[in-house]
Image (cartoon, rainbow, N blue to C red):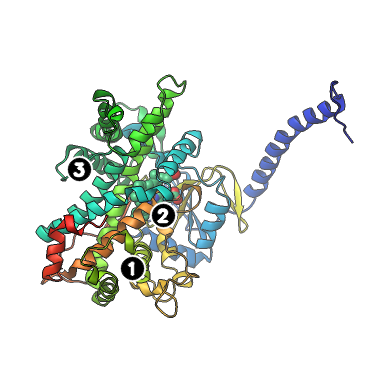
Amino acid sequence: MDTILFGQVDWSVTKTAAIACIAAPIAIVALRHIKGLSSKKLPLPPGPRGLPFIGNALDIPQDNPWETYKGWSDQYGSDIIHLKVLGGDLIVLDSLEACKELLEKRSSIYSSRPRMTMMNELLGFSWHFAFMPYNEEWRERRKIFQQALHPTRVEAYRERLVRGVRNLLLQLLDDPDNFRGHGRLLSGAFILGITYGLDIKSDEDNYIQQAERAMVSMSAAGTSSYMVDFLPSLRMLPSWFPGAKFKRDAKLWSPDAIALPRDCLRFVEDGLVGTNLVARGDAPPCIATELLEELAPDDRDYVEKKRAIHDVLGAAYAAGADTTVSAFATFFLCMIQNPDIQKKAQEVIDEAISNLGRLPDFTEYKTLPYIEALVREVIRWRPVTPVCISMTSTSTAVPHEVTEDDVYKGYHIPAGATILANVYSISHDPSIYGPNPAKFNPARFMDASQTSINPDMPMGYDAFGYGRRVCPGLQIAVESIWLVVVSVLAVFDLRPEVGEKEGFVRYNSGMLIHADPFKMRFIPRSKEAVELIRNTETATNM
Ligand code: HEM
């Protein structure tokens, strides 16, 4: 046994330590190598046979690819399937069990992102940490984001959210046809408000226009097929080269992609430096101000730290605005399609607040189980990021990348494979969410008495992803949807437009899904409801 002696060197200990230091890394590398070698002997997960070179690229439909993935999963009797697309490996996870096992339990090797040449390198979205690989840069940004928007701090932003939703009610009263635009303004203005302290009043605002242009370019890059994502070396082609349209597209879109985080942060910096608002205590309360104030200009890492702030704040808008808007539209749609559910929700709200002579606010949060169930059902029924767009389009919504060879249920998962959770199919799995999952039915989240949330039922939040990359804006998103649901139903009856069919509305397939345009009416429920909306001063109980 080795002994430790003070005052003199015990060479036996030093020697053992030295051997351990050298041997341990070698053993780890060797084990990984052996694991890699042995796993490579195993078969890949099953999947349809592809064509030479393009593989399965043409097998995946543009519309509702999640249904096709699920079909293959049933056909091959496996909860993971493998596809080859232009030489790349794509593994689709078709069960909650597989997502939990791989994306959560083995998250140390399943949390990276595939290279996105068009999006990150040519357009300039490399600042968006949702698209970053699993590395130190990502870790730093994720940490800042989580601290800034920690659930205990979200309450501080509720007042702004309440104001935004009151404004939404007013807009729905005066200009109901543009209900989607109003939802967009609410979520965009709210996020730009909490991050940069911007006080956005209309969708004509320059900052919101610019942010929206950036989102349009992100969506276009994510929904189009660009060969450069499969053959990154093509990025070196000059833009005049035949077939190099991607370069011309990138040139057109990149100014907006770069401007979104840069100009908003500049707004805050100008306010801080130019007028010394902080010294006067007048700086807009926002995350940017807080983070910038903590920065010391003589800090050795000043430039890198400021870059991280720039990236984190931009990511909040890029990841949070459009996603929430999609959920708002799904809520409206579900209400006109399910008048009985709408009525039941209104009864619950009326019982809780009708005598109070005010609009709902966060006082009611967590006290209305049926409304909580309704919000969960909105998120479950049409998950905003259902799986991905088809691989004939290049960028998928939120793909993961596995960084080491691995084995799951006897199948080899090759390092570098793109991993997709088939969130749509999991959200519609009857063994998890009960019978008739295609039906919008908040009651599935309630217990047998229908008075409380069923604690044994999963939250229905598959749409927010899994593991270390799970959406860090979940709480803000859920609270925003909740407040819109409870406020809108308190004062409006939602009805389909006269003459419009209230039946099936298609959803587009893209980085995120959105319901196709539909028309509806927002009918004030009473004279008092109109007064409450108009008199927002009185209505704000904060
Ligand atoms: C209904 C609304 C929303 C949905 C459905 C949603 C969904 C998602 C999903 C699926 C991911 C990727 C998860 C993964 O890789 O496994 C994600 C990432 C992210 N979300 Fe959300 N999100 C929503 C709202 C928000 C909001 C409001 C914010 C910010 C205020 C936000 C910020 C982010 C960020 C920063 C990431 C990147 C995380 C990372 O890569 O580490 N999201 N979101």
Mark whose residue sits in front, 2 or 3: 3
Q: Any atom of ligand 1 within 8 Å of the CB at mark 2?
A: yes
Q: Dot 1, crowdedness within 10 Å: few (<14), some or many (≥20)?
A: many
Question: Residue 247's spot in the image, x, y percent?
Answer: 29, 32
Q: Dot 2, crowdedness within 10 Å: few (<14), some or many (≥20)?
A: many
Secondary structure under badge 3? loop
* Quadrant where the C terminus is found in the figure: bottom left
Q: Dot 3, crowdedness within 10 Å: few (<14), some or many (≥20)?
A: some
* Quadrant where the N terminus is found in the figure: top right
503 left or right, relative to 72: left
Can residue 413 be seen here? The reply is yes
Q: CA distance from mark 1 to mark 2?
A: 19 Å
Q: At 45% from the left edge and 52% from the top edge, which residue is drawn?
A: 420
- Label located before the other in sequence (3 or 1): 3
Question: Residue 264's spot in the image, x, y percent?
Answer: 27, 34
Q: CA distance from mark 3 to mark 1?
A: 29 Å
Q: Along the line of sight, which residue is nearer the eye, 363 or 265?
A: 363
**Residue 464, which numbered label?**
2
Q: Is residue 46 above or below residue 187?
A: below
**Circle 1 residue:** 371
Secondary structure under badge 2? helix
Can residue 307 be seen here? The reply is no
How many tags in the picture?
3
**Circle 3 residue:** 200
Q: Amino acid at mark 2?
A: Phe
- Label located before the other in sequence (1 or 2): 1
**Residue 26, which numbered label?**
none
